[in-house]
Image (spheres, helix red, strand yellow):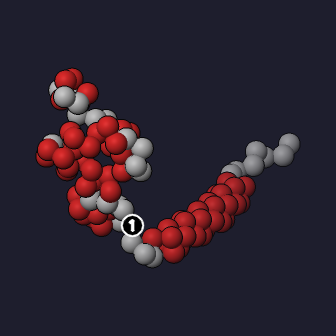
Amino acid sequence: MSRWSRFRRHPSRDELSAWLDGERPDLDEHLATCEVCAVALEELAAPSGGPIAEALAAFYRAPDDLSERLEQRVTDRLDSMVMIEVMSELFGAGLETSKLLLTEEPPHE
C-alpha cells in the first residue's frame, strides 16, 4: 500500500509539480488512478494554466493601443489644465482691473 492511499489525501500542487519534474516517483501509484489529481496535473502541465486561464486572460487582456490612448488622455488633460490656469489668470487679472476701475476713490480733501 502506498503512502498516498494510507493517508487518503491528494498531493499538493508543489508535490504534483515535483512529480512532473521527475522528482517524486512515489506518487506514481496514486496518480495512476486519481481523477482529481489528473485534472490538477493537466492544469499544471498546461503552458498557460489551462483553458479557463486562457479564457480569463483573453477576457481581461488590455487593448493593444491602451498605452497610446492613456498617453493621449493624460496629455489632453494636462493641456486642459494649462488652459484652465491661463483662463483663470486672465479672468483674475480682468477682475482685479475691473475692481480698480470701478471702485470709487474717496474724494481728495
Residue 6: x percent and y percent? 19, 24
* Residue at figure coordinates x 23%, y 58% from the top left: 52
Q: Is residue 82 left or right of residue 19?
A: right
Residue 98: x percent and y percent? 66, 59
Q: Secondary structure at mark 1?
A: loop
Q: Quadrant of the N terminus?
A: top left
Q: Is residue 81 left or right of residue 101?
A: left
* Residue at figure coordinates x 55%, y 70% from the top left: 71
Residue 73: tell me if it is visible: no
Q: Residues within 10 Å of mark 1 (few under 14, many from 20)?
A: few
Which of the 4 image quarters holds residue 9?
Answer: top left
Give the residue type that dot 1 points to: Ala
Residue 63: x percent and y percent? 39, 72
Q: Is residue 45 left or right of residue 94?
A: left
Of residues 69 and 74, the one nearer the viewer is 69
Q: Residue furthest top?
A: 7
Q: Quadrant of the C terminus?
A: top right
Per the image, the residue denoted by label 1 is 62
Residue 35: tell me if it is visible: yes
* Residue at figure coordinates x 20%, y 39% from the top left: 30
* Residue at figure coordinates x 22%, y 41% from the top left: 29
Of residues 78 and 103, the one nearer the viewer is 78
Residue 53: x percent and y percent? 28, 58
Q: Residue furthest right?
A: 109
Of residues 65 and 9, the one nearer the viewer is 9
Q: Is residue 48 above or below residue 66?
A: above
Which of the 4 image quarters holds residue 51?
Answer: bottom left
